[in-house]
Structure formats: structure tokens, C-alpha cells
Image (cartoon, rainbow, N blue to C red):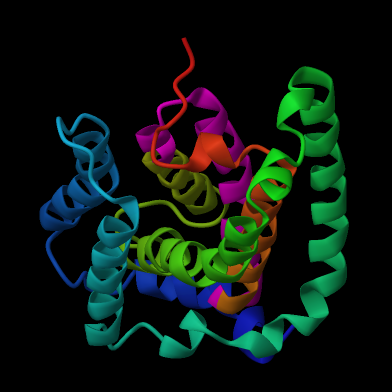
Amino acid sequence: MTALSSNFMERAKAVAHRKPVMSRAALWIEFLVLFVGLPLGYRFSPRPIPALPVLWVAALYCYWQLRRDPTFPLILLWNPGATAGQLLSIFVCFGIAAAIVWSGVRLMAPELLFSFVRTRPILWALVMVLYPVLSAYPQGIIYRSFLMHRYAAILPQGAAMIFVSAAAFAFMHIIFRNPLAVALTFAGGILFAWRYSATGSLFTSSLEHSLYGCWLFTVGLGQYFYHGRIAFK
């Protein structure tokens, strides 16, 4: 673990006691608009809206606000040097989770198992390449770097902040209109937020996020994470 990551929590505590960039009321309004109102508006929109442009507009807004904030170290948005010391932990956790998901699909929906790879291999390969860049990383900016820094003055720190990050991340997935997406992303959100807070590296957290996302598409559950195509009755 790098020196940068070792004092991440101390820095977060200091940020929590700084003078907020906006009033507490304004921060709460912004939080509710971004993390409650936006997902609800998208979910109940009468017209279909492409998800990625909305995600990127939100990510660019969050990045812009972080760039303007002198108390936010921009190195946290990348910091790949922290990754090497985390690889064993990342791959052990991923191996266990991947085996559990594979077993669940095989037992409960065997027709889905590797269906994406078998039926649309070129599109699957494209998703494997683009998902980390177009989806996982911008989500990391919003739900890890921005949320955990911006609202440090109005939200509790430590495990509670990790929980809030994961809950907001999972709530966003109501746009896919099925409880499986929400449940899996809450579990993943806990892990990704913890990894970010433990390393001070959005690169490391997003790498881990990408592994799980790509595996869900590979094992056959991608349809539950693709623009609300599946709705549980």
C-alpha cells in the first residue's frame, strides 16, 4: 500500500471537518438530485433514453466539481501504483464470487450460461474492451471519488460512508427494472468503495469493478444490466 493510500482515511476525516464548498442544505439538495432524483427520473421516463450519455454527463459534472475543489487530490482519480499490492486480494475475492455466480446461473438458469459469448461473440468481445472505459470508470468517478469526497461534510465517515456509496450505486440500478441488478450491485458497491478507501486509487477500484461487470456479461447475466430489457414479474 502506498503512502498516499495509507492516509486516505485521515484525509477523509480532515475533509469532513473542512468548510463545505456549499451550504449543508445545498449539498443535501445536490445529493438527492444526483443520487435519488436522477435514477428515479430515468426509471420512470416515458421515453427510452440511452444510458451511457446520461452516465457520462453525470460523470463529467462530478469530475468538473472535483477539479474545482482544492481539497481533492486529483491523483486519487488514477493512482495505478496502488494496484500491485492489491492484486492477490482482488483475484481471490473475484475467484470466489465468480464461482458462486457461475454456480447460481448453472443451477437456476442454465439456458443463460455463457449465452452472450455463444450467440454474439463479436459484441461480447467489444463489451469486454469498452465496459471498463465507458461504464466502470465513470461510475467510479460518481459513486466513489465524488460521493465520498463531496459529501464528507454531511455524511458519516468510515464504514457508514462505504455503505452510503454502495446504496447509491445499487439504487442507480433500478433503471434496469429488476431486483437482481440492485442486489448484486449493492454487494459489489461495498467492495468497490472499500477498495477505493483502502487504496486511494480509483484505477484499482475500477479495475475490480470491471472484472465483475465483464464476468456478469460473460456468464450470461448481462441482460439484467442492459437498459431495462428484463423485468421480473
Q: At 88% from the left edge and 69% from the top edge, which residue is drawn?
A: 88
Q: Whole-percent x and y of residue 118?
A: 73, 45
Q: Whole-percent x and y of residue 8?
A: 56, 76
Q: Whole-percent x and y of residue 224?
A: 53, 34
**215 to 11, vertically: above or below:** above
What secondary structure is the magenta-colored segment mainly? helix
Q: Is residue 166 left or right of residue 195?
A: left
Which region of the structure is painted magenta?
173-202
Q: At 14% from the left edge and 67% from the top edge, which residue is drawn?
A: 22
Q: Is residue 106 left or right of residue 40?
A: right
Q: Residue furthest top?
A: 233
Q: Is residue 98 left or right of residue 158?
A: right
Q: Is residue 201 visible?
A: no
Image quarter where the N terminus lies is bottom right
Q: At 46% from the left edge and 42% from the top edge, which residue is drawn?
A: 226
Image quadrant where residue 64 sits: bottom left
User: Which of 17/143 is in front?
Assistant: 143
Q: At 67% from the left edge and 64% from the top edge, which residue is drawn?
A: 208
Q: Whole-percent x and y of residue 204?
A: 64, 74
Q: Is residue 197 magenta?
A: yes
User: Which of 42/5 is in front?
Assistant: 42
Q: Is residue 174 magenta?
A: yes
Q: Is residue 86 left or right of residue 226?
A: right
Q: Is residue 162 visible?
A: yes
